Image (spheres, coloured by chain):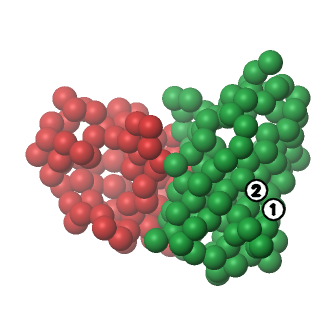
Chain colours: A red, B green
């Protein structure tokens, strides 16, 4: 079973700053199978990035995703007040088929 | 725009069976998509429970497989979750969702289920 480890657990930044969130997979993961979500308190998660680097419909271009080996990164270029939330990475595995999530990174206002 | 709405009891007794239904609107349960359940214990992260395809094919999380059944009712355009032998550890917000290509594209608003006597 592939384990996704997100870091840091909490990231404290100010609006206008750049945020870099990491998701490391315990084994090789196809980029096609990696997604990122944003979750605000009391709300369902929202798909941000799929296929490691493609933005979902309606997602601003300040959100971007990248990959290097088993390390996946979500970057928010300039933080807006509404970006402070919890972010999860997720991978799809084919054997057995199913999804696993990272433990989340909380992005909080400094 | 696909919309999903969970419904079911908010309180289940220990050792009982948790039963939830997800009503799908703005799209057909018979479309070329997988439909899934995800849960989130209070203050914790997300856990995928399982998925079903229009024809009834299912996949379940290995950790829950022995207790989970997901089914689909095409006539009602909905799908359901049953989780048996529940304990306090099964207390969570349960989300139904429609999957995209290896991701969860559309989510319901979630429903809190508490396991307590």
Q: Is residue B55 above or below residue A66?
A: below
Compute the Cα span from label 2 to label 1. 5 Å
Q: Residue at x 79, y 67 (%)?
A: B73
Q: Quadrant of residue B4?
A: bottom right
Q: Chain of mark 1?
A: B
x and y, in percent, of residue B22 in the image: 67, 56
How many neighbours does mark 2 have within 10 angstroms: few (below 14), some (14-19), or many (20 or more)? many
- Observer able to see residue B103: no
- State the quadrant of the C terminus of chain A: top left
Disc 2, disc 1: CB below 8 Å? yes
Count how many numbered circles sit on residues in the image.
Answer: 2
Which sits earlier in the primary sequence, circle 2 or circle 1? 1
Determine the residue located farthest toward the left in the rendered image.
Answer: A16
Q: Chain of mark 2?
A: B
x and y, in percent, of residue B15 in the image: 88, 29
Q: Residue at x 24, y 63 (%)?
A: A60
How many neighbours does mark 1 have within 10 angstroms: few (below 14), some (14-19), or many (20 or more)? many
| Residue A40 shown left or right of residue B33 in the figure | left
* Residue beneath disc 1: B71
Name the one closer to the observer, B56 or A109: B56
- Observer able to see residue A48: yes
Q: Quadrant of residue A8?
A: top left
Q: Which mark is residue B80?
A: 2
| Tag 2 secondary structure | strand
Q: Is residue A52 above or below residue B49?
A: below
x and y, in percent, of residue A1 in the image: 69, 52
Q: Quadrant of residue B13?
A: top right
Name the one closer to the observer, B98 or B117: B117
Q: Which mark is residue A37?
A: none
| Residue A9 shown left or right of residue B47 in the figure | left
């Amino acid at each position: 079973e592939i384990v996704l480890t997100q870091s840091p657990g909490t990231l404290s930044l100010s609006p206008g700053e750049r945020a870099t969130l990491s998701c490391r997979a315990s084994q090789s993961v196809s980029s096609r199978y990696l997604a990122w979500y944003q979750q605000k308190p009391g709300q369902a998660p929202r798909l941000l990035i799929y296929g490691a680097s493609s933005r979902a419909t309606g997602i601003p271009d300040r959100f971007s995703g990248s990959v290097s080996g088993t390390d996946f990164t979500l970057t928010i270029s300039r933080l807006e007040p509404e970006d402070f939330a919890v972010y999860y990475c997720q991978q799809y595995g084919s054997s057995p088929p199913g999804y696993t999530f990272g433990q989340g990174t909380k992005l909080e206002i400094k | 725009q696909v919309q999903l709405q969970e419904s079911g009891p908010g309180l289940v007794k220990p050792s009982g069976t948790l039963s939830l239904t997800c009503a799908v609107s703005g799209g057909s349960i018979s479309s070329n998509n997988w439909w899934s359940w995800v849960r989130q214990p209070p203050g914790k992260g997300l856990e995928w429970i399982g998925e079903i395809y229009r024809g009834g094919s299912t996949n379940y999380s290995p950790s829950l497989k022995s207790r989970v059944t997901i089914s689909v009712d095409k006539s009602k355009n909905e799908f359901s979750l049953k989780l048996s032998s529940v304990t306090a550890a099964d207390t969570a917000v349960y989300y139904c969702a429609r999957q995209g290509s290896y991701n969860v594209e559309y989510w319901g608003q979630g429903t809190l289920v508490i396991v307590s006597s």
